[in-house]
Image (cartoon, helix red, strand yellow):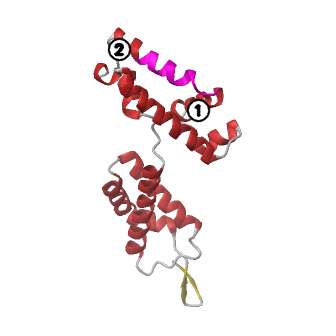
Amino acid sequence: MNQTAGKATGVDPEDLYRRYGPMVLRRCRRLLGNEEAAVDAMHDVFVTVIRKRDVLHADAPSSLLYRMATNTCLNILRSKKRRPEVLGGELILRIAVLDDAEARTAARSVLARLFSKEKESTRTIAVMHLLDGMTHQEVADAVGLSVSGVRKRLRVLRSRLETLEQTSGLQGRVA
């Protein structure tokens, strides 16, 4: 901690990282259940510490960091719940690993029917977001829509895919 006129002001991010990094990582692992996501969340916590080092008062640094890690992870979990990143994820995963030529043909037929009724921009949005891994904001900027417009198009597409899956008989054929 820095000292100014005998009063504590701010924190030393490097010292906090060395001393409490493992604790923060354990907390993130426990909440997220995924090593990569936990490491990213831990880094987010310490980026916040760096940004706010002059205003943070770490009288109890372990409690502060534990709370920050918890809040960061809960925000990540809430975001995932609100905005699932995978469009018909289970079906698409099953299609991707098909070995049976007949099932692959049926799957292609379903996807062709799905996209034949969509605007070109919707197909572009799906490819950018699902295959290229672009965020909703990046896709929105690229296609000239709002983020909510992109989300709506993906949501409608997901719903249509689920309906097609149910009506196509693909469910039983794609293991």
Q: Main secondary structure of the magenta part?
A: helix
Task: Identify residue for label 2.
Answer: 103
Task: Identify residue for label 1.
Answer: 128
| SS under mark 1 | helix
Query: Exactly how many numbered labels are in the figure?
Result: 2
Q: Would residue 114 be counted in the magenta stretch?
A: yes
> Looking at the rendering, in which quadrant would you find the C terminus?
top left
Q: Would residue 113 be counted in the magenta stretch?
A: yes
Q: Amino acid at mark 2?
A: Ala
What residue is drawn where x is 52% and y is 37%? 156
Residue extent of the magenta highlight: 107-119
Location of residue 109 in the rendering, given as x and y in whole percent from the top left corner = 45, 15
Q: Which of marks 1 and 2 precedes in the sequence?
A: 2
Question: What's the CA distance linking mark 2 and mark 1?
Answer: 26 Å
Pick out the residue farthest to the right.
Answer: 144
Q: Amino acid at mark 1?
A: Met
